Amino acid sequence: MTQHPRLMSPLKLRDHTLRNRIVFGAHTANMSDQGMPGPRFGKYLVERALGGAAMVVAEPVPVHRTGVLTRGNFLHSDDAVIPAFRTITDEVKDAGAVIIQQLYHIGAHGDSDLSFAPHWSPSGGPSYHDSDGSHAMTGTEVEVLLEAHVAAAVRAKAAGFQGVEVWAAYHSLLDQFWTPWSNQRSDQWGGALEGRTRFSRELIERVRRACGEDFVVGLAVSYSEAYEVTLGAEALCEILSLHDRTGHVDYVTVGAGSYLEFESIIPPFTHGEKLTTPLTAQLKGVLKHAVVTSEAGVRTPENGEAIIASGLADLVSIVRGQIADPHLARKVAEGRASDVRGCISCNQMCWGRRSRDYWISCLINPSAGREFEWGGDRFSPAVMPRDVLVVGAGPAGLEAARVAAERGHRVEIVEASGVVGGQFRLAGMQPRRGQILELMDWYERQFDQLGVRLRLNTFLEGEEVAGHGAEVVVVATGSLPDETGFQRWVPAEASLPGIEAGGVWSPEAVLRREARLGDAVVVYDEGGNWRGVGTAWALAEQGKRVTIVTPEAFVGKELARTAADGVVRRRMGSLGVRMLAEHRLVRWHGNGVTVRSFLTGEEEVIAASALVMATTNRAFDVLPEVIPGKVMHRVGDCAAPRLAAYAFHEGRKVGMGI
Ligand SMILES: Cc1cc2nc3c(=O)[nH]c(=O)nc-3n(C[C@H](O)[C@H](O)[C@H](O)COP(=O)(O)O)c2cc1C
Ligand code: SF4
């Protein structure tokens, strides 16, 4: 029996009954193949439908050549996509979900490198995607875009979609029309509210006429309070109630952020949760026909249940939560919510890949995007169950052990330290990263259920591994910090002059609380990611005087792909952290460090009681390459030190292959 009765309760939407309140909301998975929907995209959606989502909103198709945004966008204005989408929509519907397609045009914020077209907008405002400007549409062009939306909706219907979601979120084209700051037109498409909403109202009328009464029409909106020029909650309520009067809009889905405030659209762990309920609650009070969906940071079944039970929204969109665990809804329905693998809000492999124009995946669920070749987040039983020994319980070892055990192997995992998780657990000690620790608890619960034998505080020598009864050995012994002080930006210097003075530590030693730091700490960060930045932030939160020095052009460069870098820089700024970019270390003095600017060559001595060096780790692997009679695998950092995503990936792959 489910402990989430409201979340699991059905809801009527036009002629459809949604089996529960969980939507797999629209997101650009960027998986098209030459603009065509293929197996990668299809099986990605089908997996979430099989996993129990009530409604799946397929990634947006641009409605016109002037609104193309990504390499993986589906072909716009082309009927060739219809049969390819049909295969996918059939399968999603067979799995019990309603399938909708989002339609988008991003107005001023297109990507010229992909569209090679001027981007059309109401008044020719600047792009917030890059530094390009846009084209102020003529009246004829406005009409072209209206018809392009209708044609895309008709195409979606022909492809088997049961509805479309019209995109007015994040300061997209429709939002640009609505917002006085970006709509300075003096014709019928601008001016007072009536004029500014004419485009969207006309569009919805025409879609309804063209696609019929049984077709679901949703409207995606968002709100951001970061800039006063974007629409606030009150303005949105007024606009949406105007649209609601015709009864053509079946649902309104509310996201957070805007192109002007990108970091809140896909809120990383630096933000809170349930970001849009203040507006959805207000909308519930004003909308008579449309039901309301809350997006952004819903993440867990508990949050979803709380939102529905307290009447803050009718539906919840859980995007990253279902990327991370495609079977979230089914597990909740089966009363197994504690088996849901919770998204850790890192954005590293979902938005972090999309922002660099790759197809998306997930740090903790590497099957995301590979369902068509790996068979989804469900594993086929082993042909012959074997005894498997996993050495090391970091991400690679944990995942290898779990997947091997799920497939029926008899698994023992040994770990030298007293806890599971390796360096990844230490990341969970950084500010606001407790979701990582929850993931570690999840692994331990899974091990209990699967009968995996976990031995902590156990360091196995080569002979012990050789003498162990396992037929298969997975070496996942991780990596260790480099202790020479080598800087990869200064390749000719093998070590940092003065390191022998002591007081130089790794981020791991800091997070394990082994480092004796004093009050003033310099963090030298070559990675530009959480290992260095998160450690500097943690130290600042503890009240230390922190200077972060990086050879990169700005602090947190690698976090930019996750949209979390600005947030953490602001947080560190407010804590008084000094940030020094494009500098290297010259010498450690025991009580300070000399740094040199790459730009001017000028040197400066920064007084410090400790230096923390976040530089590239070295693989740790002391087991024999081959042990007679055993099949050996090496996964994760012991093969090559990398970000955690690749350790989870290799762990799963090996677990699936044994
Ligand atoms: C990789 C990625 C791409 C996204 N692309 C879109 C998009 O094309 N259209 C849209 O309306 N929302 C998009 N979103 C935003 C999601 O719909 C959702 O609002 C956001 O992920 C926050 O919800 P969550 O916390 O459940 O993930 C995207 C999200 C992700 C992770
Ligand atoms: S990559 Fe991170 S944020 Fe994205 S779905 Fe996976 S766990 Fe969640």
Image (cartoon, grey):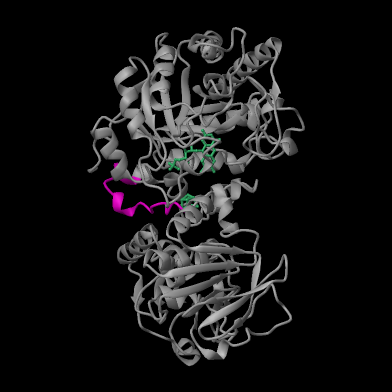
Report x, y in % for residue 493.
70, 83
Please tell me which residue is depicted at 39% across the width and 43% down the height of the picture.
297
Report x, y in % for residue 300.
34, 46
Please tell me which residue is depicted at 39% across the width and 9% down the height of the picture.
245
* Quadrant that contains the N terminus: top left
Please tell me which residue is depicted at 43% across the width and 83% down the height of the picture.
469
Span highlighted in magenta in the image: 331-346
Q: Is residue 28 visible?
A: yes
When asked about the image quadrant of residue 598, the answer is bottom right
**Secondary structure mainly formed by the magenta segment:** loop
Report x, y in % for residue 614.
55, 72
Vertical arrangement, residue 163 with respect to residue 624, above or below: above
Q: Is residue 375 visible?
A: no
In reply to whether residue 345 is colored magenta, the answer given is yes
Residue 383 left/right relative to 141: left
In reply to whether residue 574 is colored magenta, the answer given is no
Of residues 77 and 376, which is closer to you in this image?
A: 77
Residue 403 left/right relative to 549: left
Of residues 484 and 599, which is closer to you in this image?
A: 599
